[in-house]
Image (tube, rainbow, N blue to C red):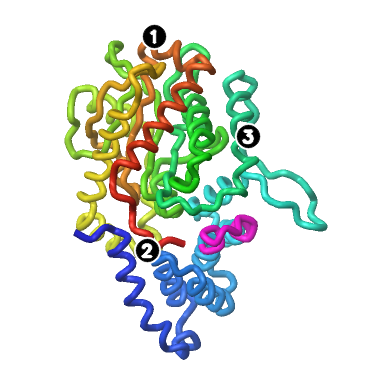
Amino acid sequence: MMDRRRVLSFLAAAGGLAWLRPSVLLAASADELAGEGQAELTGGNVAKALILLHEAQSKDPRNDRVQALLGRAYFQQGDARTALTHFTLAVRLNPEDTLSRLLADTISQFPMPAVKGGSGRETSSSRTRPSKLAQDAKAEREALAKGAGKSSRQGPWRVLVDAGHGGLDAGAAVGGLREADLALDLALRMARALAPARNEVVIHLTRTADVSLPGWARAGLAGFYGADLLVSLHAARVSDPAAMGVVAYGYGREPSDALAALVARVENAAYGPGASWKSRGGEGLFLSAANDAVGQARFERGRELARALIRAIPAASPLPPRAAGSAPLELLEEADAPGIFLETGFLSNADAAAALGSPDKRQALAQALADALLAALRGVEMPPAAGRG
């Protein structure tokens, strides 16, 4: 069965007929050119997409969809500064373009090279938190950013690590611990631990600060980054205080056990309402059909990797591996990539909360999770190289 990337590549190839007839560029409208450009982006042809999108921009400079797609194209090309400019313009033209706003906010969390004559001011959407845990996360973020520009992006696996919750959504809270802070701290530590393996895996992060990010945008970022795997980190509170240890879930229509049902109920409540990212631009019907056609293979890959990750976590981990299962988690259902929903421990368990509250144990846990993820990826067939930007 074809995976989703192949389905979309086929669509791009069909649109490529216009590429063979340059006269079409003169006749096509900005929206039609934007559609062609988006198909080329989906197929990984960034250079062709940029030509089409700049032609669309010349026809209609105030087309917000064109500006959003230019932002995506430049980001895929590695030009974050130009991408930020186009995403910002897209939001100015259409203040309701929440995804472009969130992508601009995400990009601005990372330092970018200074421009001569620039103001030198830093842009940040994060809000300062006085807690020790937030300070630890800031230090980890700065250490990660030092090597961000050096990644060759040659790794065959693209993994999007999602720090669950954030901003106005604190997630679970016990004492002075917030699930959002814990997830962010672990995500940053995992990214640093995996940095030496950049030839095998390239890590992207949905957030690097304490910012709000709705669930549908997290799902959209998996497709935006062209991720081969989404790993979402959490530390929920559930009604079963005996729940402990690390549990990994892939997507399943029915929960694999009682704990999976509890986790799905809690986490789906935090996922939040809102239109899916897939609905914009009239693409919803096609993508919905593609999801139905290839979703089962994607979900099975997520469950396979969840099982492999749990098997690879050492028993000596600060929080030992407990189980791998499946749950009807909305994030995993909507994300355009196989996904693992990782409960790194349950704050409803006193022993787990104590372990998660210790910086040393969080570091040891992050290292154990990073090593297990790498082992899991090494144990399955690598994703195809085609369709990469």
Q: Amino acid at mark 2?
A: Ala
Q: Nearer the viewer, mark 1 or mark 3?
A: 3
Nearer-N-terminus badge (1/3): 3
Residue position for label 3? 143
Q: Between 296 and 158, which is closer to the camera in this rendering?
A: 158
Residue position for label 1? 350
Determine whether the residue tagged by mark 1 lies in a helix, strand or loop: helix
Residue position for label 2? 386
Determine whether the residue tagged by mark 3 lies in a helix, strand or loop: helix
Nearer-N-terminus badge (2/3): 3
Picture disc at residue 118? none
Image x and y of residue 75, in percent: 55, 58
Image x and y of residue 379, in percent: 30, 41
In magenta, the rendered stretch is: 73-85
Q: Quadrant of the N terminus?
A: bottom left
Q: Amino acid at mark 3?
A: Ala
User: What residue is at 51 percent from the left and 68 percent from the top?
Assistant: 66
